[in-house]
Image: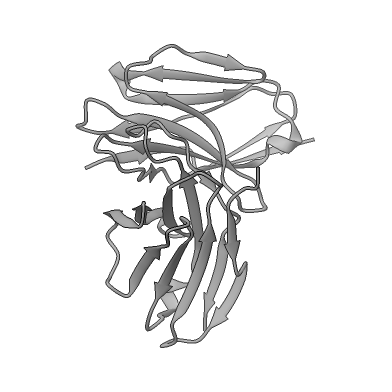
Amino acid sequence: KAGVTQTPRYLIKTRGQQVTLSCSPISGHRSVSWYQQTPGQGLQFLFEYFSETQRNKGNFPGRFSGRQFSNSRSEMNVSTLELGDSALYLCASSLGDRGGYNEQFFGPGTRLTVL
Amino acid sequence: AQKVTQAQTEISVVEKEDVTLDCVYETRDTTYYLFWYKQPPSGELVFLIRRNSFDEQNEISGRYSWNFQKSTSSFNFTITASQVVDSAVYFCALRGQGGSEKLVFGKGTKLTVNP
């Protein structure tokens, strides 16, 4: 079974631009979560989508948004990029239907650098 | 609010030593789930184990063992006879009740196993 895939793996943008990251979950998984990892703040939850609906959202500004498609693939978008948005963005998928007991499987991440 | 504390920022051991990684958590939920993940230099988070709040049975799996104690809100992880390949950052994570897959991560402990 293929794992979680994320594209692109590396991205360099300049301040003010916008970016879209993509995540394909494991086949059969309906929940996709996004996390931001930085040296200073560690791993922080951005949002979770389950069956095309946002089920939970972290404490990030509105510049960060996401969506999920009917095939469970998900995208996240960051508009008006700031230097502080430079981070590793990790996507995780899970079945999402066992009341919290599911393990999440993580993709390799997208390394975003904002210049 | 939920919180996970990993007090050990970095640990360095010599191969074949035993090493214990500490994790203390805070939550007001009566049902919750605890996880350990490993992040090797490649960057992808690898799931190791999960425990729910009703299961305090400790487990040994090969060279890994876990000690879950609700009385002290701790979920410690031990590697016996460490190997160089165990070198990675280890994260403890907490998921509360409510149906979302959101994980709250500790800051991580960087383990270096020297030959």
Q: Is residue A4 above or below residue A83?
A: above
Q: Residue at x 38, y 15 (%)?
A: B55
Q: Is residue B42 above or below residue A10?
A: above
Q: Nearer the viewer, residue B94 or B102?
A: B102
Q: Quadrant of the N terminus of chain B?
A: top left
Q: Is residue A50 above or below residue B63?
A: below
Residue A65: x and y in percent read 34, 69
Residue B111: x and y in percent read 61, 39
Q: Is residue B7 visible?
A: no
Q: Residue at x 42, y 68 (%)?
A: A76
Q: Residue at x 49, y 50 (%)?
A: A92
Q: Nearer the viewer, residue A27 or A90?
A: A27
Q: Nearer the viewer, residue A27 or A10?
A: A27
Residue B49: x and y in percent read 51, 28
Q: Quadrant of the C terminus of chain B?
A: top right
Q: Residue at x 35, y 39 (%)?
A: B4
Q: Residue A11 vs residue B9: left or right?
A: right
Quarter assignment of residue A34: bottom left
Residue A39: x and y in percent read 49, 59
Q: Residue B14 vs residue B97: left or right?
A: right
Quarter assignment of residue A17: bottom left
As drawn, the residue found furthest toward the top would be B57
Q: Is residue A33 visible?
A: yes
